[in-house]
Amino acid sequence: MKSAIDILNERIGAAMVRVTGCQSCAAIVRPATDPKFGDYQANGVMAVAKQLKTNPRKLAEQVVAQLDLGDICEPPEIAGPGFINLRLKPQYVAAQLRQINADSTGRLGIAGEPEPQTLVVDFSSPNVAKQMHVGHLRSTIIGDCISRVLEFLGHRVIRQNHLGDWGTQFGMLIRYVQEHFSDVVASGMREEPLSKGLSVADMEDLYRKAKHRYDDDPQYAKEARDWVVRLQSGDPEAVSLWRRIVRASLEECQAIYDQLNVQLTQNDVRGESAYNNDLPGVVGDLKRASLATESDGAVCVFPPGFKTKEGEPLPFIIQKSDGAYLYATTDLAALRYRVDVLKADRIVYVTDSRQILHFQMLFKVAEMAGWDRRDGRKVELVHVPFGSVLGEDGKPLKTRSGENVKLQELLDEAVERARAVVEEKNPDLPPQQKAKIAAAVGVGAVKYADYSNNRTSDYVFSFSKMLAMDGNTAPYMQYAYARVKSIERKAESKGVSIPDELRDLGNLDLTEPTELDLGKHLVRYAEAIESAAADYRPNYLTAYLYELAQRFSAFYTECPVLDAPPAKRPTRLLLCDLTAKTIQHGLSQLLGIQVVEQM
RNA sequence: GCGUCCGUAGCUCAAUUGGAUAGAGCCUCGGUCUUCGGAACCGAUGGUUGGGGGUUCGAGUCCCUCCGGACGCACCA
């Protein structure tokens, strides 16, 4: 099913070509800025008129004369300096609603991408031996949403969890574990999960202790460095211990992914260590191509256009003066792997905006080396940056003692607060159901609050705001869903068979303003998904869903459904059914937020 | 110092290649009730889009400048 905006763009664009002879002109159809202008407006005529130096209103008249939109719209109106205003016909809206209803695939009548791509989405990327903290929240859930949306549109999405599983700190950690946890080490030889003896929280603690000893005790520091060497050279004992540390960390990450309803699995993990063997090749190839040069003992590429604070060329360092590699090197190796092995047509990196410069340089170096091409075709490299999560004080969210807030603790508190609300509002529900609702609402609130903010700006984290019943929040959306579901439950007791009425739909009757408003919004779900995908912006989805819930509420207040006259009832049941399905799809399929039948 | 991003209602935020009279929510005030779930709905108040200049039919959006803020800027990621 083609969306109205696409059809309008095509037809108006074609009419513009016929009138002007200009091939490159676009109709630029957008949702109307004000309902009184209709449902859509075409803004393209004015831009073309400017180019051609003609009167925009006259040009608009000529274009409209060439148009035949009678199957979709009321006659177009020209307004202001040359807008073409378009209003959907109720019959068209009704026909679209019937089509969505007839779609048994669960896609709500939304067609897939005609030319699917292979896309790599790089997100989450926590560090081994550290608990996930609030700094990992945004990458994890925004990356998940982007992946879900692109996948729904028909692309082949390869998720990549670029785990921080390598570095010199593991020498210290292994040294410490080996000394203080001989029983764990012994079991380590049997490759049992390390988590049985040692949690990631323990590891963090150990790491701090190890760091102190490293700084104070030269002998200890030497041994730690020896472990690094042993690890890098593949020493079985070192590798075994390292592997078990990684596995224990991943188990804890997976628990959080599951709780967050994020579609990441162990299969998506490809950590930094996976590229170890490729790093010398990256440096060697760049040297051979004369792109990398030595500077102050380090191997660097100097992409044009980047300067240090002294105004000198800024290096992209790929090998330190002591011979070690950096994340720049690893990122280049990963990029080559994704292009050459995973056959990516597009690579999307979801990281915080502080890394903008790094990715600009990475992409530039990849281009200089020709590594962003496969079979002569350019691979699109996209950095999707996001802002920070702030505390009430406007500074990056930390605990009182200045530590990062653990993601697990954050989620636990959200669920706990949601549980208190459920307890207050609906004390008679069975305890098990209360717990389920609290989990859906609490975790959903944290995610929804993040998604509904502009990705690029910082936002202030506030439990009370994200759990509010009013406004653009998860509980409001979930409540709207529960209300529709409540009608469905009630239908049975009133002897109304929804499946029967929806199967034998007669002509839809969208005469009430709230019916038509809701219907028009329902048929525009695809637009919201497409704009969210185009700009990698989940807040377009939340904005759409919020507006949907508002329109439903208005309809719900205005129009009785089950007690409607028999002639009106099927239409209203359909509006309810499609509202529920759309909210369900948006929240649960695209945002990964659970809906509940009752709350 | 240089660079990037940002500054929108009292507060938190929207505004989709530059589009019409800058929109929501919270707060405040007023209204709706014989609950298909009131965790709701309807309405009102509230703005020189940080200041100034420019580009044009049209600027929150683009350019210049000043003020204020966040982040980044050679061997951490």
Image (tube, coloured by chain):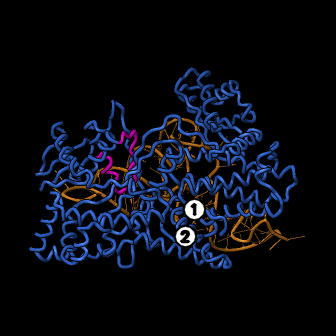
| Same chain shared by disc 1 and disc 2 | yes
Chain bearing mark 1: A
Report the chain shown in blue: A
Q: Is residue A357 magenta?
A: yes
Q: Tell whether A315 sits left or right of A533.
A: left
C-beta proximity under 8 Å, tags 1 and 2: yes
Residue to which mark 2 is pinned: A439
- Give the orange chain's letter: B
Task: Measure the C-alpha gap from mark 1 to mark 2.
Answer: 9 Å
Judged left or right of residue A150, residue A60 is right
**Residue A224 in view (yes/no):** yes
Number of residues whose C-alpha sits closer than 10 Å to that of mark 2, classed few (under 14), some (14–19) or many (20 or more): many
Residue drawn 41% across the image and 63% down it = A254
Is residue A59 shown left or right of residue A297? right
Q: What's the magenta region?
A: A342-362
Q: Is residue A83 above or below residue A318?
A: above
Figure quadrant of the N terminus of chain A: top right
Mark 1, Cα crowd under 10 Å, few <14 / some 14-19 / many 20+, is many
Question: Residue A29 appears at what percent x and percent y?
Answer: 61, 37
The C terminus of chain A, quarter of image: bottom right
Task: Indicate which disc residue A594 carries.
Answer: 1
Q: What percent of the width, then of the height, locates residue B9?
A: 58, 63
* Residue A21: image location, x then y, percent: 57, 20
Mark 1 vs 2, N-terminal side: 2
Q: Position of residue A314 (x, y in %)?
A: 22, 48
Is residue A355 covered in magenta?
Answer: yes
Element class at badge 1: loop
Chain of the residue where label 2 is placed in the rendered structure: A
Q: Residue A192: which numbered mark, if any?
A: none
